[in-house]
Amino acid sequence: MTKDKLWNANYRKIWTTNFLVHFAFMLIVPLLPLYLSETFGATKDTIGMVLTGYTLMALLIRPFSGYMVDSFPRKTVLVVFGFLFFGLFSGYIVAGSLLSFAIFRTLHGIPFGATTVAASTVAIDVVPSSRRGEAIGYYGLSNNLAMALGPALAIVLLGAFSGSYKALFWVSLITSLIGLLLELSIRMPHRDYVPEKKVLSLDRFFLLKGWRQAIGIGCFSFSYGVVSTYVAIYGKEELGITGGTGLFFGLCAAGLIISRLTGAHALRENKVSRNAAMGVSVSIFGYLLFAALHNPIGYYGAALIIGLGNGHMYPAFQTMFINLAEHSQRGTANSSILTSWDAGVGLGVLTGGLFSEYYGYHSAFWAAWAVNLFGLIFYFTSIRRHFESNKLR
C-alpha cells in the first residue's frame, strides 16, 4: 500500500460493510409505519413510540460504544455487535404481536448503535492521516447509496412478494450476514491495547468539547427524523403517492452523493467550517419546501435539496468532532456525533408521531423546519467560531 492510498483493501471492506448494514436498515425503515398500521392496526402516536425505542437504545449504547472501541480491539467490538445486528433481524420474522415486534425492534437498536460506531472508527484507522477528512466524506457515500437503493428495492420486493413484509425482513437478515462475513476479513493495523488506568470521566463517553456541535447536529437530525419516518404514510394518505417513497429517498440520496463528492476536496483542504455552512444553509430550504408545498413538486423537490444540504453538513460535523478530540478519543468522537444524531432523530420520530396524530402532518413538518432553523442560527452564532478556536488539527 502506498503511503497516501485511500481506497486500500481494508477501507473497501469496511466501506462495503457499512453499506450492507445501512442497506439492511433502510430496506425496512420507510415502510415500518405502514407495516405496523396494516398488520397490527397501530395508531400514529403508537407507531412513533414503537419506532422511537430502536433509536433510544442506539442512543444509550453509543457513548459506551465509543469507550469500548477506544479501550478494546476494535475489530472484536465490530464483529460481536455485527453478529447481534444480524441475529435480531430474525425477531421481526417471528414476531406475532405489536408488543413482541416492539421488543425486538427496541433491542435491535443496541447492536446497530455499537456497530456503526465501531465501523466508522475502523474506517478512520485504516486510511492515511493525510486522507482522513476525505475518507470521512467518501465513507458516508455508503450510507447514501443504501438510502437510495434500500427503499426503492423495498417497493419492488413488496410488489413481487404480494405485499409480504416478511420478505423484506429476510432480505435484511441475509444482507446483514454478508456484512458480518466481511467484517471478519478486515485486517486492522497493529495497536497496543493497554487497560484503562486513569479514573473514568464523562469525557471518556462523550466528547464534552463538542457539546455545541452536538446540539447543532441534534437539531438537523430532528428534522430528518420527522420527515424520513412519516414521508411514506403522509404521501399515501394526503398526496395519493403510493409508490413514491423509493423515489423520494432516491432523490435524497442523489443529493447526498453529489454534495459529498463535491465537498470531499474541500474537506481534504481542511475547509470544514465552509462545508458545514453550505450544508446547513441549503437544507433549511428543503424542509421549508416540504412543509409549505403540499404537492409532488414539494414532496420530491424537498428530497433532493435536503440531500444536497445533509451531504455537505454531516461529514463536516463529523470532521469537527474528530478534529476536536485527542487521538485516544477517536471512538468517543465518533460515538458523540452518532449519539447526537440519534437523539435528534428519536425526538423527531416521537414528536412527529404526536403532532401527526393530534394536529396533522403539516404541523409536524413545520416543527421540523423550525428546529432546523434554530440549528442554523446556532451554527453561525456559536458552533463555527468555537470550532475554529479549539480544533487540534
Image: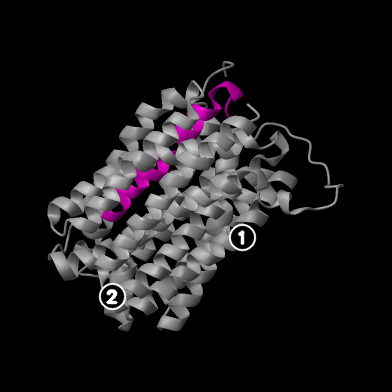
Q: Position of residue 228 (x, y in %)?
A: 33, 58
Q: Residues within 10 Å of mark 1 (few under 14, many from 20)?
A: some
Q: Is residue 168 rendered to the left or right of residue 117? A: left
Which span of residues is magenta-colored? 126-151
Magenta region, main secondary structure: helix
* Residue type marked 2: Tyr
Q: With respect to residue 50, does 127 lie above or below?
A: above
- SS type, badge 2: loop
Q: Residue at x 28, y 58 (%)?
A: 154
Which residue, as the protein is rendered here, is positioned at the far right?
197
| Mark 2 → mark 1, Cα distance in angstroms | 33 Å
Q: Position of residue 291 (x, y in %)?
A: 24, 58
| Residue 147: in magenta span | yes
Q: Is residue 259 rendered to the left or right of residue 119? A: left
Q: Can you see residue 143?
A: yes
| Residue 118: in magenta span | no
* Residue type marked 1: Ile
Q: Which mark is residue 359?
A: 2
Nearer to us in this view, 17 or 54 = 54
Check whether the beta carbons of the residues at disc 2 and disc 1 lie within 8 A of each other. no
Q: With respect to residue 100, does 386 lie above or below?
A: above
